[in-house]
Image: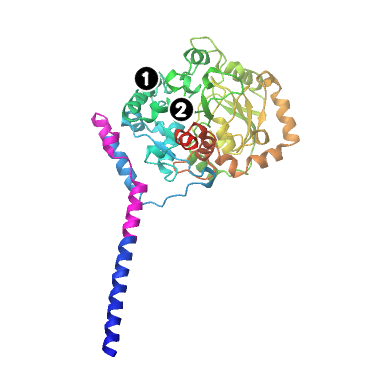
Amino acid sequence: MRILHKGRQSEKSLFFKYYKWVLWFSFTLYFLTSFFITNKPLPLSKTRVSGSKSSLASRVLFESVNKTRHKSKPKNPAAFKDLKIFVYELPSEYNEDWLSNKRCSNHLFASEVAIHRALMNTYDLRTFDPYEADFFFVPVYVSCNFSTVNGFPAIGHARSLISSAIQLISSNYPFWNRTQGSDHIFVASHDYGACFHAMEDRAIDDGIPDFMKNSIILQTFGVNYKHPCQDVEHVVIPPYIPPESVRNTLEKAPLTGKRDIMVFFRGKMEVHPKNVSGKFYGKKVRTEIWRRYNGDRRFYLQRQRFAGYQSEIVRSVFCLCPLGWAPWSPRLVESVALGCVPVIIADGIQLPFPSAVKWSEISLTVAERDVGKLGRILEHVAKTNLSTIQKNLWDPAVSKALLFNDHMQEGDATWQVLGSLYKKLDRSYKRSRVSSQ
């Protein structure tokens, strides 16, 4: 009996060892399979196009993808649920090559670079499988062709460059053709958005290119009336201000520190028009500001450039944000980020992210025709509700909503963009297919 009992025990022990080994192997196989299914990028053979630059771009993307797998992945924000965005891999002449000039990623139009970087680093929202994507991001940098004459971005090449990119993706992927680009996203961070011209009359004459009219445009230009340059599905975004420049300024002068300048503006204020058309810059509003308030002790007005002008903003109570060629201005973001009350002088302007930034509670709006009353208006505010406005303005969430980061943060400008896109999921081909089944 003892011998029989020992035999049964050895059989039982052998069975459990075999069972544990099978269980361990099954779990290992399951986790490895899950990893490769959920993290696999498209095979490079599917994304390559002819030419050495394309091969280089493919290698760069492949290497960056494999590096990011080893980093901890931020969770897909609950606010966006299962939103998925596919970022096209384009040859480097469409984006990366332009970064050889450091200004490309730091100037006021650089949101096209910042949004691309943030999406590349937002691992749970970004998908490597285009068939599960809601939207398709087309990363073309068109603002980095700086003029050798005046240093300003020259965007005459924008239409042909974007057209070339569309030709490339429509020839190598089926996704553009099935919707005519209605679920594709572009950034147009220029004066008049996808009209691609700094002068309004020329921008209107040129209009938005036909090949972009079905797509979603992330653009800095926005007005609250009908305009040909926003006659497209769009999201109004803030101009780009490097977040590190804001942090560096606030380290030297805190947000709630002494503000010894009552009204501040530094920028172009023409006495006589200096352009070929004979038009005054900014509809003559800036010229009027200079003529009326130059010499007024309440106003600190400067026409020359100064690299350290943020140190002046952080010392100021009110910062004038008049229109230039277009209604919007980078001063809007800098003023908010540095705690200076923005005084917006641009009739009909549409401001970015109104659900996150309560503009009426943190800024003042003065009609262009009322520039002559600026002194009285600001004196009245200073004596009445200035402290309330500043309290609202100095809420950290307000400035955060207007700043782009390379790695998206909850509540920042990229987060706000994604929130706006989430409201446009009716344009998602994938969703429409599911709902029709």
Residue 141 visible in image:
no
Q: Quadrant of the N terminus?
A: bottom left
Q: Residues within 10 Å of mark 2 (few under 14, many from 20)?
A: many
Question: Which span of residues is magenta-colored?
Answer: 27-55
Q: Position of residue 45 (x, y in %)?
A: 26, 36
Q: Which amino acid does the dot numbered 2 rest on?
A: Ser
Rendered image: mark on residue 332? none
The numbered mark at residue 160 is: 1
Q: Nearer the viewer, residue 382 or 166?
A: 166
Rendered position, 279 above or below 59 = above
Residue at 40% over, 28% down: 178
- Residue 398 or 94: which is nearer the viewer? 94
Per the image, label 1 sits on a secondary structure element best described as helix
In the picture, measured across the screen, residue 189 lies left or right of residue 335, that is left
Q: Residue at x 59, y 29 (%)?
A: 351
Q: Amino acid at mark 1?
A: Ser
Residue 421 magenta: no
Q: Residue at x 34, y 30 (%)?
A: 173
User: Is 201 drawn above or below residue 378 in the view shown?
Assistant: above
**Coordinates of residue 227 in the picture (x, y in percent):** 56, 18
Q: Residue 158's image quarter?
A: top left
Q: Nearer the viewer, residue 365 or 434?
A: 434
Q: CA distance from mark 2 to mark 1?
A: 20 Å
Q: Which residue is mark 2?
A: 182
